Image (cartoon, helix red, strand yellow):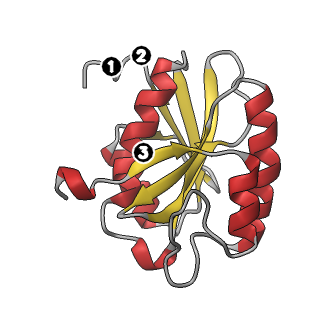
Amino acid sequence: MDQDSKPRLVEAVSADYQLLEDGRAPHGLTLPEGGAMPREAAKALALLCGRLKADPGWGSYLIVSEGMVAGAIGLLREPQGGSGEFGFEVAEGLRRRGIGAAALDEFLSIARSNGLDQLNALTRPDNSVSASMLESAGFTCDGGDPLRWRLQLAQSDAA
């Protein structure tokens, strides 16, 4: 993936997800065929984004690739004690192109710069693509169902 086509994160607000819920793209972007995410996910993210904007003031991002909303990545709740749980969604038709991995890399930098020491994620046991992406980024799987993943950000600064 060359630098020009590398996905970027755009800070999101509730209204962005409300537009996605209605099948419209924010910020003059376009949507992939089939949309950027399921309508229910956009609705939930609209509510969550409002809470994250209030406290801690960051944490929800649209993944933008080639002028298109390719998905979203962000915290799932307010961080506690230096630790935050996050999730991500890449539009179904845009998966397996490195978009999620590039978005995760940028999100890890944002999390570090906002003082998080650890990030946690959950995946279904059958989601081998997400598991592989998290493992490649240095996350450790603690098992369970759903699978629990964690990454100590302070230790991965040198990576």
Q: Which residue is pictured at 74% across the width and 34% down the height?
A: 52
Query: Which is nearer the N-term, disc 1 or disc 3?
Result: 3
> In the visual, does 109 lie left or right of 91?
left
Query: Which is nearer the N-term, disc 3 or disc 2?
Result: 3
Q: Which residue is mark 1?
A: 157
**Dot 2, crowdedness within 10 Å: few (<14), some or many (≥20)?**
few
Q: Are marks 1 and 3 in contact (CB under 8 Å)?
A: no
Q: Which residue is pictured at 28% across the width and 53% down the height?
A: 6
Q: Which residue is mark 3?
A: 104
**Dot 1, crowdedness within 10 Å: few (<14), some or many (≥20)?**
few
Q: Are marks 2 and 1 in contact (CB under 8 Å)?
A: yes
Q: Residue furthest front?
A: 28
Element type where label 1 sits in the image: loop
Q: Which residue is pictured at 54% across the width and 15% down the height?
A: 115
Q: Position of residue 105 (x, y in %)?
A: 36, 40
96 and 51: which one is in front? Answer: 51
Q: Amino acid at mark 1?
A: Asp
Q: Position of residue 58 (x, y in %)?
A: 64, 30
Quadrant position of residue 81: top right
Q: Is residue 92 above or below residue 121?
A: below
Q: Which residue is mark 2?
A: 154
